[in-house]
Structure formats: structure tokens, C-alpha cells
Image: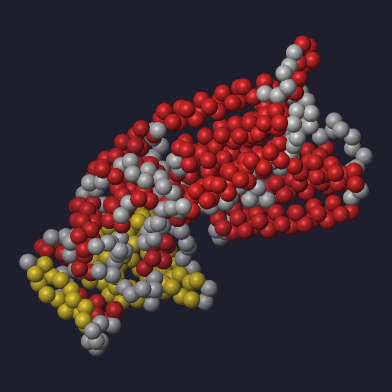
Amino acid sequence: MTSKLAMVVTACLLILLASPWAGAPLSGEQGRFILLELRIPRVIMGATVGAMLGLTGGVFQALFDNPLATPSTVGTTAGAALGALAVLVLLPATGPGLPLVAIGAFSGALVVTFAIAAIAASGRARINDVLLAGIAISLAAGAITTGLQFQADMASTFEAVRWSLGHLTQVGYEGISLLLPLTAVCCTVLLSQLRALESMIGGESRAHAQGVNVRRTRTLCLTAGALGVGGCVAWCGPIAFVGLIVPHLVRLSVGPARRILFPLSALGGATFLVLCDAIGRVVMPSHDLPVGVITATLGAPLLVWLVARRRR
Amino acid sequence: MNPGLQLDEVSFQAGERKILEGVSLRAEPGECVALVGPNGAGKSTLFRLLLGLIRPSDGQVRWGDTPVHELSGQARAAAMAWLPQHGLIQEAIEVLEFVKAARFRFSEGRSDSLKAAQSALQAVQAESLTHQAITTLSGGELQRVMMASLIAQDAEMFLLDEPANHLDPAHQATFYNMLSSQWASGRGILCITHDINLLTRLAPANEAARVRVIGLDQGTVQFRQQLNDPSLPEALGDLFKLRVETVEVEGRRSFLALDGDQR
């Protein structure tokens, strides 16, 4: 068990460290620039976002006691998408360089986060009510997003579609300096609830009887998860499947013990996303393929395979 | 005032339906109280009130002088440990990890928690299950692990909701013997059960007077008696609307439920 764990961790770290060199060979001054200003920031961004998505997925699946829960389950992703599109459509003149889209997306995510936190903090709501509210918010935000798209011109619609695929394109370290502190805080908050979440394996009522402040744990986890993921979506767009399948993969390889599952979901999420991006770079070197396309293309069959395996 | 659970004229209403009405009850550490009554009598609701999972619509539920919903999580978990009726665990978590989770109320390191969990498993003779996945246990093994979890939480009172309901007779006996030794070590026991005969396992025949039996039906207390009360069979018969007779085998009184209303 310990040796298997060490192997998994070592493999993840090796992939993360090697990935900047995957892709077209680099040489000279230009190669140096590509490595330092494009690829390394991209890998760091991928690891940051992947870790946030993987950990949030693992925590949400535990919190909702539902294997289908994902970081987007509570609606922040849909809220962010609506915010991003509103900026793209209503302020079409904004040129590149200004992270106005990111600000719009983050505002959308914030609004949804507060709504969800308010529901979670109210005494009467059951955890499934939060799930239901998240789905309702996602559907409503999705409908408004489609409506906005219907009104928009071709250019901003194309921008919106590209945004919605998720990407890791980075120039320099601006995004990292914004996102890394946020995700670090959010991940720390999520991991601080480890013992409470361990107690919740026996159900929320039993955890309450064991001394857990269930409402507080719920609210902290939902807020930290939603906020961290909202930040990631704001900068990189919604990246599908990482938060859903990585915790399942980890569970299959090292078991459901929270103490290992959560940190390894973060590490696994980071590795999976960075690996997908590296694959994109190797397979289609001349196109900047949105990483969301690869995570979904690889992730969907992987998920089906996982489900089929479990049914047996 | 002594620590202990106290209900004063407690009522609980779910929508239009009255689940409990004017129930008063005291149970202190060191005491053993059995709650009996037909399905739907409000027994499990009473436990949820005691734990602060729900609030009474009328009356007060206190631990010592403090209303239970005002207790801190730590104080609540130090006062009461609970074995719910439906304890299905879906995660294939290791038994030791599951029992360890019950140490939540203690500010201690992981190794101390694990040590406490291990000795709790020893106390119920379940060391051999330590590293098994909890989903692979038999009903009897699972209930033993649940008891270990209560012991690991180390609360003053144990609240058990029909703990031996789906166990075979041998496992039922083992479970109540474990419960008996927990009571003997000074904990308070508050136990919901349908099977009054199992209660006789809690105390040797000469101590049966220390086991209090409270009959609950349609949300109100029907009787309060001791386990050795001569009129207990009649009271139970009224409660379940059956004829209840007793036989004495090897100095222990057993209750027999027979068909037909005795009244």
C-alpha cells in the first residue's frame, strides 16, 4: 500500500516536471523564451487549476455523498460562463490584454457561490437541497447564456465558444500570480475539514453526534470549493471532467480513505490536466488545441470504462 | 445540577402530525433506561431531540442546565454517543479509520486517535477486523465495530436505537453483554428496543431493579417501571395490545408475547 502510494506520487511528480519539455524541440534564444515564458507558466497554471478541480471534486463527492458530484455541480461554472459571455457580448469592444472576461466570469461565480453558501448555511436545508439548487442554478444560467449568445454577433459568439472549451494558454506569470494565492487558500480551507469529512462517512447526523458542526463544514467546503473553482474558470474557462474522474481514479488505485484521497486528488488533478495539455502539444503542435477538448475526449471514455468496471 | 439528559414536557410536531406530546424524562450517567413501544411511537424522534438534530416545538431538552442545541460540538459529543438504527456505510473505508473518526471531539494527534481506536476495537474483541473494509463485514461484525466507535468517542451516555434488531440470537446476546459491561464501567445507557428479553442480559437478576423501562406509545409516556416490577408484563401487554406472560428460566425472567388482547 505504502509502496503503491509512493509509486503513484513519484509518477505524478515526474510527469509534472518533464511536461514543459514535451512538444516541439526548443533551441536558442527563442526556445528559451518559449520554455520560460510560455511552457513553464502553462504547466504551473495547469497544475494549479488541475489541483483545485481534483481536490474540489473529491471533497464535493464526499460532502454530497454522491459519486457524480463535480466542481461544477453547485453551479459556479455556469455562473462564470454567464458572466464571461455577458462581458463578451455586452462589451464587444474590449481588446485582448484586459482580463475583463475573467472579471465578468469571476463575478458570475461569486454570485452563485454566495447563493449556494446561503442555502447551505440555513438550518433546514439538507445536503441534497444544495445539490438540487446547484443544478437549478446551472440550468437557469445556461439558458440565459444561450439566450445572450442568440443575440450576439458572429465574432463574440466565436469568442464565447472558444472560451467555453477551456484553455491553458499563458503568456508570462500574470494569471499565476492572481490564481495561485486564491487556490492555495481555498485548498487549505478544504483540507482543514478533513477530520470532519472523515466523520461524515457515517452520514451527516452521525457526524453531528460525534461533535462535528455540520453546517459550518458544509458552508466552508462549498464556499472554498466554489470560489477556487470560480477563479480557475474565470481565467481558463470551464475545463471538463478533471474534477469528476480524477477522484474516482485515485479511489480505485489507493482506496477511499479521505486522508489520502483528498491530497492525491489534488496531485492527480494537476498531473491529469498537465498531461492532457502536453498530449495536445505533441499531437497537434501547430494548433493551440484547447485543453478542455482533450480532457473531455480522454475523460469521457475513461469515465465510461470506470462505470462499466464498477458494474461488473 | 448533575450532568444528565432531561426532557421537560417536550412536544414535537411535524407539520400537522404530533410525534411527541408532553414527554418528560431524565437519564443520568450510570443509569440504564430502556425505551420500549410499538413502531411509530416516537422513540427515534426522541433520540433526535436529545442529540439536538431537531428542536422541540414545545418544552425543553437539556444536558445539565444547558439546552442541547446550545451545546458546543465538543460538549455534545462528550455527553452523548449515538448508534442510529440505520447505520449503512457505503464507502469501503477501513474499519480502523472508521472507528478513528469517532475521536473527532478530541484535540489530539492522529497516532493518539489510532491508539484509542485500536483499544476500542480490542474492547469489543474485533481486533481481527482492524484492517478490513467496513463494507465487507457481516451484520454482527458491523454492530461490534459500531460499538467500538461509541467506545472510541468515550461519551458519558450511549444512545442506542434498536441495536440488536437484525442480529441472530447469539450476536444479540454478545451485543447486550458488551453493553452491560459498558454500563458497569459507569456510562449511562439509553436504549430503544422491541425485545424486552434482551434487557435482562444487561443486569444480573438481583440488579434488575436498576434497569428502568419506559413505555412510549403515540408520542406519550404510557408507563415507567423497573425491569423486575411484577406488573411489567401487564404494562407491556397494554402497550403492544398483546397478552404478555412470563416464565422463569435459571433465575431469569423471560417475557412471552401471546396472541389476543388481554384486556
Q: Is residue A268 above or below residue A307?
A: above
Residue with the most extreme left position: B250
**Which quarter of the rendered picture does the N terminus of chain A lie within?**
top left
Number of numbered labels in the structure image: 0
Could you say where residue B77 lies in the image, as x and y percent from the top left? 39, 49
User: Where residue B87 sits: x, y (%)?
Assistant: 38, 57
Residue at 20% x, 68% y: name it.
B197
Q: Position of residue A50 (x, y in %)?
A: 63, 35
The single residue placed furthest to the top in the displayed view is A28
Residue A225 visible, this orientation: no
**In this rendering, position of residue B222 left or right of residue A16:** left
The residue lying toward the viewer, choosing from A58 and B203, is A58
A74 with respect to B132 (left or right)? right
Can residue A6 be seen in the rendering of this structure?
yes
Picture quadrant where residue A134 is located = bottom right
> Horizontal placement of B203 versus A85: left or right?
left
Taking the spot 83% from the left edge, 56% from the top edge, the residue there is A147
Using the image, determine if residue B205 lies above or below residue A74.
below
Relative depth, front residue between A18 and A170: A18
Q: Position of residue A122 (x, y in %)?
A: 59, 56
